[in-house]
Amino acid sequence: MPLNVPKKTKLFVELGEREKDMFKHMHTQFQKDLVRIRLKTAQTYADLLSDGNAPMSYAMGSQIRLNARHEGIGPVFILKLQL
């Protein structure tokens, strides 16, 4: 006599089986996505540095350095500027 397995449990078992069968492909895809995210982050940060919009930027030929950072999330936060 077969047991009545709830749909959610059946789905969990099916996903677990799929992960067992395709673990190598899933891990490879995860690694590729991780490298893409790191590359995009580095490219964006390099663009910010070249435009002078990064948290710490240096103006060409200037002796003044401005460092900006924020503390807190949401409607209340502190913006600290260091000149």
Image (spheres, rainbow, N blue to C red):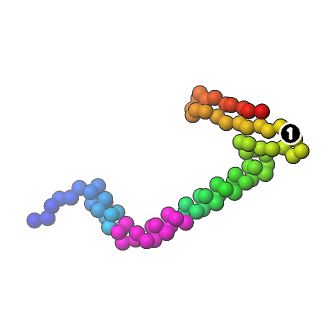
For this rendering, which residue is in front, 24 or 57? 57
Task: Give the magenta part as a residue range.
Answer: 19-32
- Compared to residue 58, the image places residue 33 above or below, namely below
Residue 7 point in image, percent of width and height: 27, 57
Residue 25 point in image, percent of width and height: 45, 71
Is 32 left, or right, of 83 in this rendering? left
x 29%, y 55%: residue: 8
x 71%, y 36%: residue: 68
Query: Quadrant where the N terminus lies?
Result: bottom left
Amino acid type at mark 1: Gln
Tell me where residue 56 sits by quadrant.
top right
- Compared to residue 19, the image places residue 47 above or below, namely above
Q: Residue furthest left?
A: 1
Q: Main secondary structure of the magenta part?
A: helix
Q: Which residue is mark 1?
A: 63
Tell me where residue 14 sits by quadrant.
bottom left
Tell me where residue 22 sits by quadrant.
bottom left
Is 70 left, or right, of 46 in this rendering? left
Is 59 left, or right, of 48 in this rendering? right
Residue 46 among magenta residues: no
Q: Residue furthest right?
A: 61
x 67%, y 56%: residue: 42
Q: What secondary structure is marked by label 1?
A: loop
Q: How many residues crowd mark 1 within 10 Å: few (<14), some (14–19), many (20+)?
A: few
- Compared to residue 77, the image places residue 4 above or below, namely below
